Image (cartoon, rainbow, N blue to C red):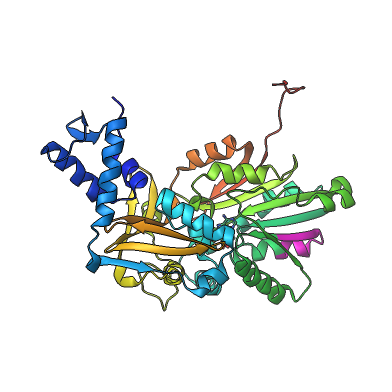
Amino acid sequence: MKYYKYSQLVKEYNVSDRTVRNWVEASLKGKVDLKLHEAKGRYYVANSVANNAILESLADHGKKYRNSRSSKSVEPNRSFYETYSPDQVVDIINSLEKNHELPWDYTYFGNSAEYWDEYLMELHAAKNGNVITNSIETLKLNYAYLDALIEKYDHVNVVNVCVGNNIAIHDLLSRIKASGKLNRFIAADISKDMLDVAGRNIDRWFSGSVKMERCLIDIKRQSLGLITTDSNVSTGENTVNIFILAAAVIANFDSQQRVLENLNASMSKDDILITTDKRDTPQSRSFFDFNTKNDTSMIGFRRKDLLDKLGVEDSFYDVIQEFNESLRRKILRIVLKVDLTLNFEVLGKRKEVYFEKGTSIMMWFAHSPTDAEFVKILENSGLELLMSAQSLDQELMLTISKPRVSQSTSRNPI
Ligand SMILES: C[S@@+](CC[C@H](N)C(=O)[O-])C[C@H]1O[C@@H](n2cnc3c(N)ncnc32)[C@H](O)[C@@H]1O
């Protein structure tokens, strides 16, 4: 018999896990007419037309009788609508409704971009190994290999994707610049504010001798297109493009493969992709400290800033940090202590998003694939691993890959 997982009902009817359990318990006691299915001693709601009608009315009934004392209705503030475009507001609404998730991508906007710069600079200055110092150190340890890869080219374009504040690639960029081969430096990011911070750092470090080109892009959904084509045409065969995804950013995407495919779509056959990512270790599983030294909150400045913009007060939620073994993900989520209605206004229309008390909203996650699993994801994205190396403390993995070239002489027409 087909039946619903609890999580399906939570999403479909926008109720908490507790409410679904209550429905099942009430059905077992004969108080509700839902047909149940038993599997391994656990009861589930059967997927049937009759059940769907009952589920609909149970969810409606719950909404009508919300306890008004623990019910909050809020509106995002002006700064929210000034920070995010109407498309991004719709994306936030869709993600909240479909996945009970506030996308982490939108937490590098406005003041949060400056905050992130400060945080990354603190990591850079820290004595202990971390994702920034390890990225820089492991790149340096492998410069000889990179030099050999780019030796035959007269020009090098560097494309830093998900740019952060550029500190992770400052040394690499300086080295390519010093070789006289640096042609274009492009930074691609979803946040205009993060691009501004990253560009300001480049101006400061290189005193205007390196120009950072900006590309606003959502790499989950878009390829960079043939971003470097112009320069390849003008410099002929002599240019190689180095794409970079540094400092553990790839782990935060739901589909790492889709992001890598989007990058691959912009690469020529001899272009290079460099990634640096945290390895799956006991230390990386327990690391949740993304705060500058003055910020001790569990939720962190960037996520709190977005919740504040939405009108969601601290007292409305508890913060949970955990490593979920079955998903192999580090997770940071909030659990609502109140029934919450968010009243959006988008493209002149009002849109209400309702969450029941007890609902969990995902704020951030990071995958923890093994080294071998990550290499498999690269391969599945049409990339071929050229080399991989671990940082000396074994907390980080560097990979260098290039697009896999088809071995067949002619492609089969479909
Ligand atoms: C954790 S930082 C990445 C680390 C960065 N590569 C570094 O070296 O410090 C996250 C960066 O990815 C960007 N970002 C997040 N989601 C994105 C998306 N969907 N498309 C493009 N950029 C994104 C953020 O704006 C921010 O600059």
From this view, report whether residue 46 is shown above or below residue 76: above
Residue farthest to the left, as pictured: 29
Name the quarter showing ligand 1. bottom right
At horizontal 63% and vertical 38% (from top left) the residue drawn is: 383
The quadrant the C terminus occupies is top right
Viewer-closest of 267 and 3: 3
Residue 242 among those drawn in magenta? no
Q: Nearer the viewer, residue 289 or 83?
A: 83
Q: Is residue 180 magenta?
A: yes
Instruction: Give the residues in magenta.
Output: 174-186
Query: What residue sits 41% from the left and 55% below the top?
Result: 284
Q: Can residue 137 be seen from the camera position used here?
A: no
Quarter of the view holding residue 166: bottom right
Name the residue rendered at 30%, 37% in the picture. Answer: 53
Q: Position of residue 259 (x, y in %)?
A: 58, 46
- Indicate left or right for 159 with 235 as reference: left
The location of residue 216, given as percent across then percent down, is 66, 60
Please tell me which residue lies in front, 106 or 14: 14
Res. 145 in view: yes
Corner quadrant of residue 113: bottom right
Depth order, front residue of 117/84: 84
Judged left or right of residue 194, residue 202 is right
